[in-house]
Image (spheres, rainbow, N blue to C red):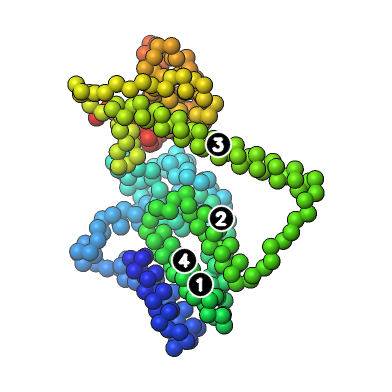
Amino acid sequence: MAFILAALYIILFFWNKKRISLRILIPISILFPLLLIGSILFTPLETASRYFNAETLLIRFSLWNFHFQSVLQNFPLFGIGLDADSLLAHLPGTNSERVGYEDFYRFLHSFRSYPQAHNLYVETFTSLGILGSLLFLWIGIYLLFITYLMLTSKSKEVTNSGIFISGVLVFVAVHEFFDYNLGEQHFFIPVVLSLSLIRIKLSFPIRKFKQNLSFKTVYMIVLILLGFLSFQLIWEQRLKNLILASTQDEIELDNFLIYKEKKPSGNRKKFSHPFEEILKNQFWIRSEENIVLASLILRKSPDYQDLVESLLNRCVIKNPYSSVCWKEKADVLSKKDQNVTRELEEGKKTDPFHIIFTE
């Protein structure tokens, strides 16, 4: 629907070419999608089920309600932080009687997917609260204002660019109302569009910086930090690829990004596991997923059991709400005949995300 609306929007504006006043066309182009979405929301369930899965839509409404109420009652101003939706189940006052809790719980445990609201606007409120939402709204209004200036420009090139970029904005705005697939990119795209719009419309000259000592120092520090971050991401991905390559006949990744152990088979190939690589590069293993995968590999050798326990201790400290960290730690400690009651209880309370299990 988002793609169709964006395409119609672009076609309509290119076809218009001053036939209709933009002061009339722009409000119509904004009101039409809103009316279309509203008509879908108020369509009878029997009719709606012919064209799309109405049950899924109702579940999303329930999730939006749960996210909104939980944040509004606990952290209304600043939200709960980025990508921290799983914390909603642990907030004070959250219980099974709250509207949306049952769908939130089922979504988390049945679909085995991260419990996002599937709505960029609700996610913004959940993560950043009222203040962050107002900032997000201001950015949106500012983008619309600059787009309007471009559409009313006397320059044909600027107007055409405004039509195309505003079409992209329509697609993002409508699509992200019902989904959250842009995910991590939802900050990147508005920034790029903002800079593009400002650069095209205002055509400001690039400022020249004096390369004095303070500028060179700051520049080198930023450059080193970016280099460190880039190396961290690339090197950790390399280690992950080595681990997955060595376990390709033992575990697999399903459609929900969940690692599963494969059932044993007689013709299973044998791969050498990267013990030495993990041992030498344990400093670069930082993400929850890679810590668990590294511990899975190291457990295959009796020589690295202390390192396995150390990695999983780091995992539960850095990710206290990670089910897989607690359950993997419980599995390791249970083999040493230690009491793992606390670890198992924490594993039950938290989220089954990226968990490795045997079917």
Cα distance in 3D space between marks 1 and 3:
37 Å
Residue 96 in the image: above or below residue 72: above
Cα distance in 3D space between marks 2 and 4:
20 Å
Q: Which residue is drawn at 45% across and 39% down?
A: 90
Please identify the quarter of the rendering in which residue 168 is found: bottom left
Q: Is mark 1 on a helix, strand or loop?
A: helix
Numbered tag placed on residue 231 in the rendering: 3
The answer to whether residue 317 of the structure is visible from this angle is no
Q: Which of marks 2 and 3 is in front?
A: 3
Q: Which of 89 and 168 is in front in this view?
A: 168
The residue under label 2 is 132
Please identify the quarter of the rendering in which residue 172 is found: bottom left
Q: Which residue is drawn at 43% across and 25% down?
A: 294
Residue 20 in the image: above or below residue 72: below
Q: Which residue is drawn at 41% across and 53% down?
A: 180
Q: Nearer the viewer, residue 74 or 282?
A: 282
Marks 1 and 4 close (CB-CB < 8 Å):
no
Q: Nearer the viewer, mark 2 or mark 1?
A: 1
Tell me which amino acid carries mark 4. Answer: Leu
Q: In this view, does 263 lie to the left or right of 20?
A: left
Tell me which amino acid carries mark 3. Answer: Phe
Marks 3 and 4 close (CB-CB < 8 Å):
no
